[in-house]
Image: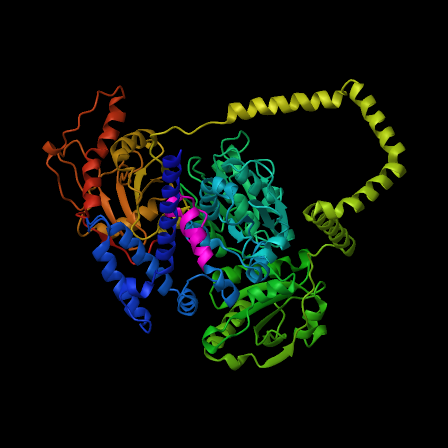
Amino acid sequence: MAPRRAGLAWAALLLLLLAAQVAAAAADFDPYRVLGVGRSSSQADIKKAYKRLAREWHPDKNKDPGAEDKFIQISKAYEILSNEEKRANFDRYGDAGESQGYSQHQHRQFHHFHEGFYFDESFFHFPFNSERRDTSDEKYLLHFSHYINEIVPDSFKKPYLIKITSDWCFSCIHIEPVWKEVAQELEALGVGIGVVHAGYERRLAHHLGAHSTPSLLGLINGKITFFHNAVIRENLRQFVENLLPGNLVEKITDKNYIRFLSNWKKENKPHVLLFDHMPVLPLLYKLTAFAYRDYLSFGYVYVGLRGTEELSSQYNINVYTPTMMIFKEHTDKPADVVQAREMKKQLIDDFLSQNKFLMVARLTNQRLFQELCPVKKSHRQRKHCVILLTGEGEKFAEAYEAFLTFALANTKDTLKFVHIYNDRQPEFAEALLMDEEKYRGKSAVVILERRNNAGKIAYKTLEDAWQGSKEDNFILLDLLDQLRTDPGLLSSETVLVDLNDELAPMFLIRWLYSTLDYISDCWDSLFHSNWREMMPLLSLLFSALFILFGTVIVQAFSDSSDTRDSPPSEKEETASKTEKNDASFSKESNRIPKKGFVEVTELTDINYNSNLVRLRPGHINVVLILSNSTKTALLQKFALEVYTFTGTSCLHFSFLSLDKHREWLEYLLEFAQDAAPIPNQYDKHFLERDYTGYVLALNGHKKYFCLFKPHRSSDEGGTLGSGEEYNSSLHTETRGKSSCSPGSRSIKSKLHKLSFWMERLLEGSLQRFYIPSWPALD
């Protein structure tokens, strides 16, 4: 027994010596000595020394067994010295921690022994030490002032998902992988992410109502909602989606799209139609609708649903490509369109931010007036507002339409066109119209510039009433031209009062909403409070409720049991049958697009700007010219020839109808006459040149195109680009015999060797024909 006890004593002694050595090593760590710099060294010297030592001791380059430990010490030393706060703490207390003061410094030796041996990462590999944990949450850390001043106001634009964590939290480590994945995914969609460390931000954690860690909560419109389900990806996404209001996006079909688009005048907003083949509205669209709900109204069209064919065909929608259209004053034609295979948040934000207002928006409140007519900041940043003071009804419709036409023809960044109803904003109209009798029952136009936020403006009113005649247009246009060179033209000054909020709900409705919000806040605070403190009050409350309403509750249960025993009514049976029919119908209409196809979109006046004029730099639209009679055959051959190039993200494929846009094509081909003469191929029926089978590679950004002329039976090699030929021996691809008719076969032969032309297009060896500007596509 004695030798055994002696062995245990020696083992304990060795363990204590090892612990002391580790603690001493942690206490003696000097970042200045590790980097070889002095205490007065600048940040540039420290950075230079770190780079030199990091290159020397990097484990991938230095095969020394101790290189990895040395590299970790170098990184730790640079982490301390590159941070001014940590460096000051080390110079003052010999430690880089945030804690200061003599009382805390007294306990450093035990603290280092505790962290350096018993629960140090390098010994037990437990990530409890907050200084050595994964730093992925650092960019999401919230402080109390930051939360109150920035996060809460921002929650009215986007929801926030917030995690409350702390050190020595086993459950926090358990949910960390799921949290990282969901945080990255939701942040890319536009959800705000926040992390609160309960150990350092106790005030904020208590303010949020978190009494344990980990806790997950959502914040939207300044209101907090706690997450109570299992921490998995699907539950967290559903939780964020449930935070959003349910009426953000309206479902649009052929039956209600006209009513939806016609509400622009009542709501004073542009209307957005989202076309996609997803049966369930994507979360990205809901978040976008929430962010822009004050400026735009959103509708969603599920193109795979029966009952949307008329809508898709009217606007030439590609059912396989998500499309977003914005409609303003004219509901028959969209004001702007964007199409993309994958709608990204940045693309949507850029598109919507440029179309937040109507062309001639109505000033319904002071906030809208301040956004459309900002205060002059400098002489170079002058922005003028042209305001139509008019009335409601058919009597003023002609003047308004003429003003809208003028605004569409004179769109500039320095001008904003708006209108206002005199009877709804009488004080605003009286301040601008000095002679009210002159303009009574008529419309007037005022040009103004805001001088400060107190309401001071400089303005000029057109002498005669606005009737929309050619003379009125010339007078207004001349004034705007003079205003560019002579700002003193706005000779009158006045102070405007704030506009009335025309779209604000009535006082009774506002009071009701405020009451509901107050009750909701009381209910949330009741559940966020400490249950032990609330037990006496809750006991008294439930006792009173039981005594006062016991009879009513018993009667309610008896009525519900009688209702449960009664057979279902005819209406309920009809509703259940209707639901079953709708479910079976949705299954039948849920068509999944085929894989391995070539997306070829028709080039029309609707998508002309997005698919060509505003095409991103480096992107090319390959356009096939066809007619109604050759459409099917040419599209099949075109898809076979360009299929191998569909993996290139910078290429887009479209087709142009020769029957509709012949003038546009002939104008474009005039720029290729000199280098590549167009052969005189005439159609036997219409005595016009036959351009079917031509292919144009259009670069919208640099304003040039490359030309492919169709292969003819008399030419063995065909015609490539600018009249250059390829040897027919290069065409080694063999295809099976087609069962098509001779006429169809001759049409398809026009695209012979198109694939070789595409290869030369990607190489950049084709001749380019430049044009001054893209013509309009009527």
604 relative to 377, above or below: above
- Total tally of numbered discs in the picture: 0
Q: Quadrant of residue 3?
A: top left
Would residue 186 appear left or right of 427 to someone viewing this image? left
Counting from the top left corner in percent of width and height, residue 138 is at 45, 54
| Quadrant position of the N terminus in the picture | top left
Q: Is residue 600 left or right of residue 68?
A: right
Q: Nearer the viewer, residue 446 or 594?
A: 594
Give the image location of residue 372, x and y in percent: 56, 64
**What residue is shown at x 27% (from left), y 45% (from top)?**
697
Residue drawn at 49 percent across, 51 percent down: 335
Is 112 magenta? The answer is yes
User: Please, what is the dominant secondary structure of the magenta stretch?
Assistant: helix
Left or right: 29, with 752 as reference point: right
Q: Which residues are magenta?
A: 109-131
Write the residue at 50% across / 59% down.
408
Most foreground residue, 233 or 560:
233
What is the quadrant of residue 454 in the picture? bottom right
Residue farthest to the front, as pictured: 2
Image location (x, y in percent) of residue 441: 70, 66
